[in-house]
Image (tube, helix red, strand yellow):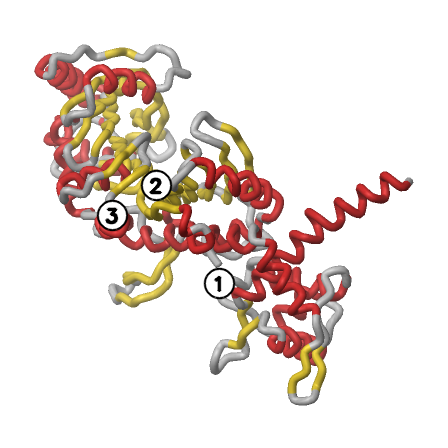
């Protein structure tokens, strides 16, 4: 039983929604060194005149920023220190001005940016631009949009004018709810109360990406006028995105009673292979990126975080009343889905392929990240309900007779039984199931016929189920609950208590 079902009388509602979204804008054709080189040749501009070519654009962006500030009665605030949090500055401004739509503030700062430098290759005799990393003045235009809520547009003053735009899905949802006349209470990018979680969820699911695209084009035109000098408009891609599942409790006391046990159990029970499973992956032996967990305490609440490369899934209590499960990705191509793929010969086919980084991938990404949150929710739901788990443990430990043939139960203190159960719960079989040979390779010293008898025993006890018309099996929900609970009781309760008793008598 899921937490949301077990504590339904203590929960106001559940909401799945995008949280932090950062979109990157690049101008096709000039966003890489070879493309800008070709553009200069096409315009008959000498490569070594590139700095002279780019300088007027810098002045145009700076003049535009000053003009925007003047029209809105604002002064551009230069941020000198690197450790200053821009969000804190903006929060203070909003507290003074209010949260009505419009331009809030403009910040500027010297920050790193990609750029180009002229280069002459003496070996080939060719002159071209090379990519380099430099520093230039950046403007941060903070505004409250009537549809997207609080946003910022980060505009560099030097070519190739790579934009960065932030908005929050919860703020966008709150704006949509206001337009529909749905009352809600929002605080720090979280909806604490609403008259209809069902209506809010429907609006969240109906994210209008085309409308967002139009908004981004408008921001680019308004705050980066240099783009009009090039023949192409901005291409928008996903730089970072968070998708949250918020379980909103009626009272802080109700969440407090279960949250400490949730975090403690999760930090001890979640293994690297589980993290991969949450994210819909198998943990390959050759995987090189970081996989691990982290526990931290923040002002908003305590947080337990599980990381796999550029992706993570975390759980925290937001202001003590919302249990939030949140999947974050800095590389959406980590995930795969069925889509149309174009081949080199010009033909197309539907196949499982990495998600594209374009803005419109927010659509299919919704279901992928929802499933990641839901897998994590199922996992922690299985490991925090000892009463139901103990009953199930008793059930699988007893001998079952089927067709006059006895099938003995599973003993969580038997080394052989534990090897079998560990192989099933390892996580790599969650997505596509397993066969006799998979388990045989995991266990090593068992023959094919021995594995067949083990599978029959697991099947009889209801811990695995056969996929129709195949030789594959998958772990049932019951099997997952039993194995997880058995390991938890053994490693976190029984063994520590036995060790304690031994120390006291020694």
- Mark 3 vs mark 2, CA separation in Å: 26 Å
Residue that carries the numbered disc 1 in the rendered image:
431
Q: Which mark is residue 196?
A: 3
Which residue is at the front of the view, 369 or 191?
191
Q: Is residue 19 left or right of residue 304?
A: left
Which residue is at the front of the view, 204 or 235?
204
- Give the residue at x 14% y 44%: 180
**Where is residue 358 drawn, in percent x and y?**
27, 46
SS state under label 3 = loop
SS state under label 2 = strand
Which residue is at the front of the view, 28 or 422?
422
- Give the residue at x 41% y 46%: 10
Badge 1: few (under 14), some or many (20 or more) residues near its Cα, within 10 Å? few
- Mark 1 vs mark 2, CA separation in Å: 24 Å
SS state under label 1 = loop
Q: Is residue 129 left or right of residue 495?
A: left
Foreground: disc 3 or disc 2: 3
Q: Which mark is residue 261?
A: none
**Where is residue 29 drawn, in percent x and y?**
21, 39
Q: Is residue 28 left or right of residue 356?
A: left
On screen, residue 391 above or below 330: below
Mark sitting earlier along the chain (3/1)? 3
Rendered image quadrant of residue 171: top left
Rendered image quadrant of residue 503: top right
**The residue positioned farthest toward the bottom in the image shown:** 403
Badge 3: few (under 14), some or many (20 or more) residues near its Cα, within 10 Å? some
**Where is residue 35 drawn, in percent x and y?**
24, 38
- Give the residue at x 30% y 42%: 238
- Mark 3 vs mark 1, CA separation in Å: 34 Å
- Give the residue at x 52% y 62%: 430
Residue that carries the numbered disc 2 in the rendered image:
241
**Where is residue 15 drawn, in percent x and y?**
33, 47
């Amino acid at each position: 039983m899921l937490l949301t079902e077990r504590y339904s009388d203590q929960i106001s509602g559940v909401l799945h929604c995008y949280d932090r979204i950062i979109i990157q804008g690049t101008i096709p054709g000039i966003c890489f060194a070879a493309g800008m080189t070709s553009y200069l040749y096409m315009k008959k501009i000498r490569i070594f005149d590139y700095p002279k070519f780019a300088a007027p654009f810098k002045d145009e962006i700076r003049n535009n920023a000053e003009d925007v500030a003047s029209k809105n009665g604002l002064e551009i605030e230069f941020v000198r220190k690197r450790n200053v949090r821009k969000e804190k500055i903006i929060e203070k401004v909003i507290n003074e001005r209010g949260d009505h739509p419009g331009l809030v503030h403009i910040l500027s700062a010297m920050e790193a940016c990609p750029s180009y430098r002229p280069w002459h290759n003496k070996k080939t005799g060719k002159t071209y631009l090379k990519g380099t990393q430099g520093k230039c003045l950046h403007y941060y235009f903070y505004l409250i949009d009537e549809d997207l809520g609080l946003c910022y547009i980060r505009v560099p003053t030097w070519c190739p004018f790579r934009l960065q735009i932030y908005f929050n899905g919860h703020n966008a949802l709150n704006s949509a709810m206001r337009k529909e006349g749905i009352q809600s209470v929002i605080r720090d990018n979280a909806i604490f109360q609403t008259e209809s979680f069902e209506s809010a969820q429907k609006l969240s699911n109906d994210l209008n990406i085309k409308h967002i695209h139009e908004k981004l084009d408008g921001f680019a035109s308004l705050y980066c006028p240099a783009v009009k000098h090039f023949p192409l408009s901005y291409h928008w891609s996903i730089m970072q995105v968070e998708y949250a599942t918020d379980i909103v409790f009626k009272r802080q006391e109700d969440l407090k009673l279960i949250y400490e046990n949730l975090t403690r159990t999760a930090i001890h029970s979640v293994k690297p292979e589980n993290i991969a499973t949450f994210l819909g992956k198998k943990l390959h032996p050759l995987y090189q990126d970081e996989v691990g967990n982290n526990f931290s305490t923040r002002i908003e609440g305590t947080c337990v975080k599980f990381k796999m490369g550029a992706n993570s899934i975390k759980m925290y209590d937001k202001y003590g009343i919302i249990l939030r499960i949140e999947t974050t990705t800095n590389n959406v191509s980590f995930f795969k889905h069925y889509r149309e793929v174009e081949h080199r010969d010009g033909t197309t086919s539907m196949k499982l392929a990495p998600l594209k980084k374009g803005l419109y991938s927010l659509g299919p990404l919704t279901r992928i990240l929802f499933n990641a949150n839901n897998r994590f929710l199922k996992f922690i739901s299985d490991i925090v309900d000892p009463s139901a788990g103990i009953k199930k443990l008793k059930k699988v430990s007893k001998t079952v007779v089927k067709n006059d043939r006895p099938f003995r139960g599973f003993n969580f203190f038997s080394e052989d039984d534990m090897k079998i159960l560990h192989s099933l719960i390892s996580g790599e079989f969650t997505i596509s199931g397993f066969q006799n040979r998979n388990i045989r390779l995991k266990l090593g010293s068992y023959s094919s016929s021995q594995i067949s008898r083990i599978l029959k025993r697991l099947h009889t006890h209801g811990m695995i189920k056969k996929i129709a018309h195949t030789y594959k099996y998958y772990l049932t929900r019951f099997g997952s609950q039993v194995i997880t609970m058995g390991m938890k009781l053994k490693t976190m309760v029984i063994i520590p208590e036995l060790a304690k008793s031994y120390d006291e008598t020694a």
